[in-house]
Amino acid sequence: MNGSSRESTLELMRWVVWGQRRVAEEWIRERGLTHEQSAVLAYLSKNPDAIQRDVARAMRTSAPSVSRLLAGLERRGLVERQAQESDTRSRRVRVTPAGSGLIQGFEEAMDGVEESILAPLGAAERARLHELLEELVSRIESPSSP
């Protein structure tokens, strides 16, 4: 960063996001994952027993693309897929214990980078920053489904 006091608030926010993203990308790359694979693992950890169609919708991609992505994660033992008894074309996807461990490691790394970024702020400043960001986020329209 160039240290200019003339940077806009949004430019400063981009620097903070860049710092977090850099650590996340390095963590993902070191484990041989793609961004898409890590996003799918995160989604599945928060949505247990999702079906492939749910994953495709959440990732805003096609069913064939998700199928290939899941096949790669399945080969690595990070997810498992099972056909549903009621509809054999629909497959339920679950994160394996190995996948859960990977997700936990990522979350711990992100907690660490958050702590590092926010270290100069005291508890009251952190709480106020959080409140201000929540206010800004509440005014941003959520992305629509594809």
Image (tube, grey):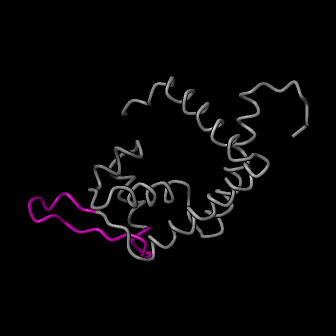
Does residue 44 appear left or right of residue 37 in this picture? Answer: left
Q: Is residue 3 above or below residue 138?
A: below
Quarter assignment of residue 52: bottom left
Does residue 92 appear left or right of residue 42 in this picture? Answer: left
- Most foreground residue, 35 or 123: 123
Q: Which residues are magenta?
A: 73-92
Quarter assignment of residue 90: bottom left
Residue 117 x %, y %: 74, 50
Q: Residue at x 52, y 70 (%)?
A: 102
Number of marks in picture: 0
Residue 94 x %, y %: 32, 66
Queried whether the magenta region covers residue 74, the answer comes back as yes
Q: Dividing the image into 4 quarters, which one contains the C terminus?
A: top left
Q: Residue at x 64, y 57 (%)?
A: 24
Queried whether the magenta region covers residue 111, the answer comes back as no
Q: Residue at x 51, y 68 (%)?
A: 104
Does residue 33 appear left or right of residue 51 in this picture? Answer: right
Q: Residue at x 35, y 58 (%)?
A: 67
Residue 82 x %, y %: 23, 69
Q: Is residue 94 above or below residue 139?
A: below
